[in-house]
Image (spheres, grey):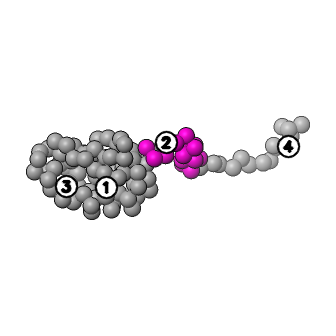
């Protein structure tokens, strides 16, 4: 009987993004996912010239860990931290990042 009821009905597609976001939020993982999304978008955030000499490698404990080649680049990016954080916070999930730690 139920088979005949379904004849002629179209199934509605469900978008997985919002569904997954809801599941992760209920599991308490949305915050971490937001930080990891920033790791993957590092080059878009800082641009090609800075992305050529740095790489976001990890998000943990509200901190984005960024690898740089030497102390000179670490100092340069430390001076740009506020501007970089503003760009990060403008992105979906970006508010998860509270600090940036530069390591060489």
User: Mark 2 vs mark 1: which is more N-terminal?
Assistant: 2
Residue 50 visible: yes
Q: Which residue is mark 3?
A: 78
Residue 72: % across, % down: 10, 51
Q: From the viewer's perspective, is 93 left or right of 41?
A: right
Residue 83: % across, % down: 27, 62
User: Mark 3 vs mark 2: which is more N-terminal?
Assistant: 2
Disc 2 to disc 4: CB gap under 8 Å: no
> Magenta stretch containing residue 13, yes or no?
no
Q: Main secondary structure of the magenta part?
A: helix
Quadrant in the rendering for residue 44? bottom left
Q: Which residue is mark 1?
A: 44
Q: Secondary structure at mark 1?
A: helix
Depth order, front residue of 16/94: 94
Q: Name the residue rendered at 27%, 61% in the picture.
A: 82
Residue 42 visible: no
The part of the chain drawn in magenta is 16-32
Q: Which residue is mark 2?
A: 29
Q: Label 1 vs label 4: CA separation?
A: 50 Å
Disc number lying in front (2 or 1): 2
Quadrant in the rendering for residue 56? top left
> Magenta stretch containing residue 17, yes or no?
yes
Q: Residues within 10 Å of mark 4 (few under 14, many from 20)?
A: few
Q: Name the residue rendered at 18%, 45% in the picture.
A: 68
User: Mark 2 vs mark 4: which is more N-terminal?
Assistant: 4
């Amino acid at each position: 009987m139920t088979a005949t009821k379904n004849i002629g009905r179209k199934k509605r597609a469900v978008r997985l993004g919002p569904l997954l976001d809801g599941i992760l939020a209920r599991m308490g993982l949305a915050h971490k996912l937001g930080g990891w999304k920033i790791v993957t978008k590092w080059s878009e955030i800082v641009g090609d010239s800075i992305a050529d000499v740095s790489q976001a490698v990890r998000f943990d404990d509200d901190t984005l860990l960024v690898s740089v080649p030497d102390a000179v680049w670490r100092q340069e990016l430390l001076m740009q931290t506020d501007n970089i954080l503003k760009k990060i916070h403008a992105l979906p999930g970006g508010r998860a990042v509270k600090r940036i730690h530069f390591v060489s």
